């Protein structure tokens, strides 16, 4: 069984406690690797290394071109391990190999390439003499030590989304993957060492008793970035409150998928399957609330259900598999609870709703693709994030009605609108209170554009130049130009006017 180590201050080390834990593969329910269990002492070592690496300027003061070159070298080293990373990601998360290999991993590389280049272009605003007697300059500077807490649904891609802008801006990082999916992040640490990142610039630790709390509240940590549930985000905000930390939060979602009567129904049905069941529904942008206009409801459902029933649930290592298992037994129980409560409260389980069995993988955490019909917008299954292969379909009559229903949740991460009417699409894109609005598509992202939520779905943006707004801070430098001993305005505080 493979064994992994932490990366602290440029060295691969065991946990200070010496403890390890088995990492469980969700498809088999069996151990796939042995990983260190980090301790609070490991947090102290990693933060101290990051603090020193930031303060002595080995990274924060490095010439932008040199920093860009090192990040590009690091990214190319990651790409050299693409096949291994894809296999580890599929094994550790249970997602189909084709999703890991052909989507998640290469997109993470693209994001790293983007920020390697973007690090050359960090700048403030042009200088000017706003008072007439001073030149004002804006400096955009790194924040310091960033604690990055990545989730289990897209562990490698989310790690890249976090370390890309943080390192490109000149910060140093302590990266902690989820306890469920540490493998590709630990491998990333090994590759960072291989690529020659300076010691302490990137440190990788794992979960353990008190680790997340210690990172989130550490006095030497200047910023905490977390992708996770709303409750996780609130916990991080509270933990960082005493030291007024910068926080960057990408939290939950409950994306509306609005299908108007003039939509291309076949395209919308395909989009709903892809958007709703991607990664076994464990995606904050997943199309989990499908609103269909009354006049096309039956026609849409016929197409949609035929496609849902053809989703191939199976071994994630096989090329033909469309959907793998949920991440854990606990998550499967959570999903089952949502489905059972929806049924008890009067919803209609149109298809699915039960555990799935895959031959040879009887211990895996599989669940059937599930479609629930529920028109009550205040129902739990409509309001709350299930984070599993469960989609709820709701009818609507008017444009005004559906936009109101779509916005009537605490989440605000992503949404989509399906229509051939450009004016209707533009009205919806303005009215929807979500950080992303797709028109006639659902899920695609690009490194050049921001991703982040409204309302309780988070604070700040991942990807694009806009991410630097979160990973940098602004300094105003004001230079007096007259060289006079006494300025004309001094009398307002001291002496008389001349």
Image: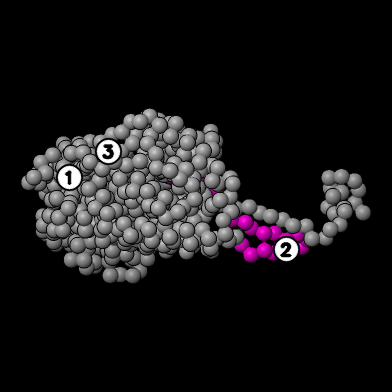
Residue 59 inside the magenta-drawn segment: no
State the residue in front, 336 or 167. Answer: 167
State the residue in front, 405 or 305. Answer: 305
- Residue in view at x 84 percent, y 47 percent: 492
User: What distance separates the C-alpha of mark 3 from that of mark 2?
Assistant: 60 Å
Q: Dot 1, how many residues are within 10 Å of its Cα: few (below 14), some (14-19), or many (20+)?
A: many
User: What distance separates the C-alpha of mark 1 from that of mark 2?
Assistant: 63 Å
State the extent of the magenta-drawn residues as a range: 125-149
Residue topped by disc 1: 27
Disc assigned to residue 129: 2
Residue topped by disc 3: 34
- Residue in view at x 45 percent, y 58 percent: 71
Where in the figure is residue 311, as x and y percent of width and height?
A: 13, 55
Where in the figure is residue 23, as x and y percent of width and height?
A: 25, 39
Question: Would you say residue 383 is visible in this rendering?
Answer: no
Residue 134 inside the magenta-drawn segment: yes
């Amino acid at each position: 069984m493979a064994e992994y180590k932490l990366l602290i201050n440029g060295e691969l080390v065991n946990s200070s406690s010496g403890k390890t834990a088995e990492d469980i593969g969700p498809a088999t329910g069996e151990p796939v690797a042995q990983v260190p269990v980090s301790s609070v002492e490991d947090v102290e070592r990693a933060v101290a290394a990051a603090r020193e690496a930031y303060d002595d300027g080995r990274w924060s003061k490095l010439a932008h071109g040199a920093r860009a070159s090192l990040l590009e070298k690091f990214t190319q080293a990651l790409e050299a391990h693409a096949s291994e990373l894809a296999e580890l990601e599929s094994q550790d998360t249970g997602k189909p190999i084709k999703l890991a290999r052909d989507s998640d991993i290469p997109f993470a590389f693209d994001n790293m390439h983007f920020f390697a280049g973007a690090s050359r272009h960090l700048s403030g605003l042009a200088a000017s003499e706003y008072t007439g007697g001073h030149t004002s300059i804006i400096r955009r500077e790194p924040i310091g030590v960033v604690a990055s807490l990545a989730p289990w649904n897209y562990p490698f891609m989310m790690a890249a989304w976090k370390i890309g802008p943080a390192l490109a801006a000149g910060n140093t990082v302590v990266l902690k993957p989820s306890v469920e999916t540490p493998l590709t992040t630990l491998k990333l640490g090994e590759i960072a060492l291989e690529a020659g990142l300076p010691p302490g610039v990137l440190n990788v630790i794992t979960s353990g008793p008190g680790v997340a709390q210690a990172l989130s509240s550490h006095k030497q940590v200047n910023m905490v970035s977390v992708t996770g549930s709303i409750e996780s985000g609130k916990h991080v905000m509270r933990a960082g409150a005493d030291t007024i930390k910068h926080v960057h939060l990408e939290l939950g979602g409950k994306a509306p998928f609005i299908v108007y009567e003039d939509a291309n129904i076949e395209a919308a049905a395909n989009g709903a399957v892809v958007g709703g069941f991607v990664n076994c529904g464990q995606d904050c942008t997943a199309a989990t609330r499908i609103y269909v206009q009354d006049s096309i409801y039956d026609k849409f459902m016929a197409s949609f259900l035929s496609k849902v029933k053809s989703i191939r649930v199976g071994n994630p290592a096989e090329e033909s598999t469309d959907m793998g298992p949920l991440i854990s037994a606990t998550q499967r129980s959570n999903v089952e609870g949502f489905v059972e409560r929806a049924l008890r409260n009067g919803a209609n389980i149109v298809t699915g709703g039960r555990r799935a069995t895959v031959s040879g993988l009887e211990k895996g955490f599989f669940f059937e693709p599930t479609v629930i019909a529920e028109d009550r917008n205040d129902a739990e299954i409509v309001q709350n994030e299930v984070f599993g292969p469960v989609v709820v379909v709701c009818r609507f009559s008017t444009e005004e009605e559906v936009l109101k229903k779509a916005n009537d949740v605490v989440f605000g991460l992503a949404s989509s609108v399906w229509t051939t009417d450009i004016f209707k699409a533009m009205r919806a894109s303005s009215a929807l209170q979500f950080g992303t609005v797709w028109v006639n598509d659902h899920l695609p992202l690009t490194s050049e554009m921001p991703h982040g939520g409204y309302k309780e779905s988070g604070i700040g943006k991942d990807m694009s130049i806009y991410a630097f707004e979160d990973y940098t801070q602004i300094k105003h430098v004001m230079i007096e130009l007259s060289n006079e001993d006494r300025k004309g305005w001094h009398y307002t505080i001291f002496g008389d006017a001349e």
